[in-house]
Amino acid sequence: MFKDLDPILHSQLRLAIMSLLIGVKEADFSYLKEKTGATAGNLSVQVQKLKEAGYIEVVKQFKDNYPQTLCKITDTGISRFEQYVADLKAYLGQ
Amino acid sequence: MNDQLTPLQSIELIQSMISKTRSSLKANSFYFLFWGWLAFSALLVQFVLKTILDYPRHYLVWLVTIPAVFITIWYARKRHNPSARTYIGESMGQLWMGIGISFFVLSIIISAGPSGWLYAYPFFILFYGLGTFISGRLLQFKPMIIGGIFNWVLAAICPMLPYDYQILLAALALLTSYIIPGHLLNREN
């Protein structure tokens, strides 16, 4: 039905991740987990898909001896997100 | 996860997630309250030492800002997990770091001349006004915007008063720029 909508973004958890990342400079994995309420496993899979599509950058590093995964939206991600919102508006007849 | 989102559900999801990223106003209130009450108390102590007790080194009370800087840095590093760096949070951090450095430079300027300290408070109040006004704009929090503007008025009035009363005026400036907006901020969210 909504076949023109970007399939990478038209998925509940991936859209939630992208909506969070569009509002911040960067966020760590636990922040995304807390805000989306998703399980670590599912979140990890979706983050990987967004990364493979080039929509987000993922940096793994150590902070105070603990591993930390930082996610940041890319320029491609921002333009795809904007296009997705524009498509949604078109569907809603705005 | 249900992938059969309707466009309306998508819009709602986007809105709810974006609203979660808004800088928690409450998170910022610690800094305003901590520095507000600290400097407010220091000013009252300075006023008592100078005006009532006639103690010549009344300005030594300001040494309290040295440990306070370390407490602020410690607090800012402590609350970082789980974390996201927001543009507003970063802007606030840079703004107040800049103002903190300006206070430090101002202290050097006023201690360089023989009577520089006589003109110190209007400039300190001017910086309170600037920092509070911009913070209020960034957080879209009206009491801070009003507090900032009010402090600019106080800064303009300050040089017309005798020095001892400038100390009290600075305390009033802190009450209106840090303390009252800080408590109101704490009640938000």
Image (spheres, rainbow, N blue to C red):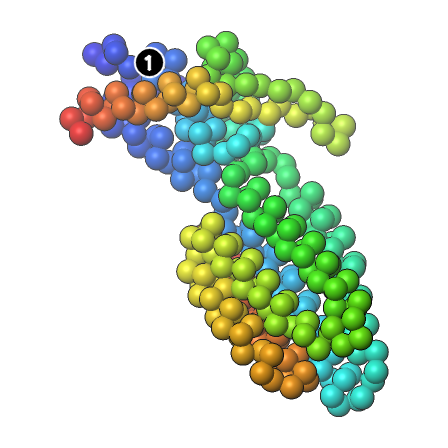
Q: Is residue B148 above or below residue A19?
A: below
Q: How far from the left and from the top, in percent, is residue A21?
A: 47, 28
- Residue B184 shows up from this direction: no
Neighbor class of circle 1 (other Cα within 10 Å; few <14, some 14-19, many 20+) is: some
Q: Is residue B167 left or right of residue B155?
A: right
Q: Looking at the rendering, which quadrant does residue A12 occupy?
A: top left
- In which quadrant is the N terminus of chain B drawn? top left
Viewer-proximal residue among B92 and B186:
B92
Badge 1 is on which residue?
A: A6
**Residue at (65, 73) in percent of width and height:** B121
Q: Is residue B111 left or right of residue A53?
A: right
Q: Is residue B70 left or right of residue B138?
A: right
Q: How far from the left and from the top, in percent, is residue B163?
A: 68, 83
Q: Looking at the rendering, which quadrant does residue A80 occupy?
A: top left
| Secondary structure at numbered mark 1 | loop
Q: Chain of mark 1?
A: A
Viewer-proximal residue among B120 and A63:
B120
**Residue at (44, 17) in percent of width and height:** A76
**Residue at (73, 59) in percent of width and height:** B104
